[in-house]
Image (tube, helix red, strand yellow):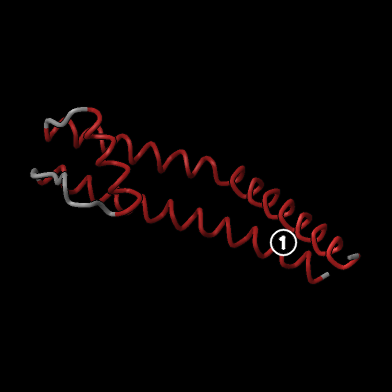
Amino acid sequence: MAMAVSSRSQAKRMRRLFFATLFQQVSILWPIFSGILVIMVGSGIVIGQIEGWRIGETFYFTFITGLTIGYGDLAPKHTVARMLALLIGLSGIVLTGLVAAASVQALNAAGRDKAS
């Protein structure tokens, strides 16, 4: 019984350390996150204007392209819009990488605490 309580408290401490470290990482990276999101949304709005899409379609295209590299249901036809879509896709890859890196850093911090 004592071992189960100790294990639960250790898991709780690791969880707390993980989220504290993740919050610290995000607080350092938020200007980069914000800049990437501004690039994505700005490019998406320009694409929507060029292609004549409604605002809902524009934001749908922007975030689906940025976070999953798209489904193909909306595709820009003009060359400038296609170039901006590439920028959105690359920005999404960078954003995903930053989130993954911050999460791994937080997991490592929680794991180091467990080892000590």
- How many numbered discs, if any? 1
Q: Report x, y in % for residue 34.
A: 46, 38
Q: Between residues 12 and 35, which one lies in front from this camera angle? A: 12
Q: Within the image, what quadrant is residue 61 found in?
A: top left
Specify the farthest residue to the top: 55
Q: Report x, y in % for residue 93.
A: 37, 56
Q: Report x, y in % for residue 14.
A: 74, 58
- Please give left or right for residue 4 compared with residue 82 in the image: right
Q: Between residues 83 and 4, which one lies in front from this camera angle? A: 4
Q: Report x, y in % for residue 101.
A: 54, 59
Tell me the quarter of the image containing the C terminus: bottom right
**Height in image: 42 above or below 98?**
above
Specify the farthest residue to the bottom: 115
Type of amino acid at the residue the image marks with label 1: Ala
Q: Residue at x 16, y 47 (%)?
A: 73
**Height in image: 100 above or below 82?**
below
Q: Name the residue that disc number 1 marks.
A: 110
- Please give left or right for residue 89 compared with residue 109 in the image: left
Q: Residue at x 27, y 38 (%)?
A: 60
- Please give left or right for residue 116 compared with residue 52 in the image: right
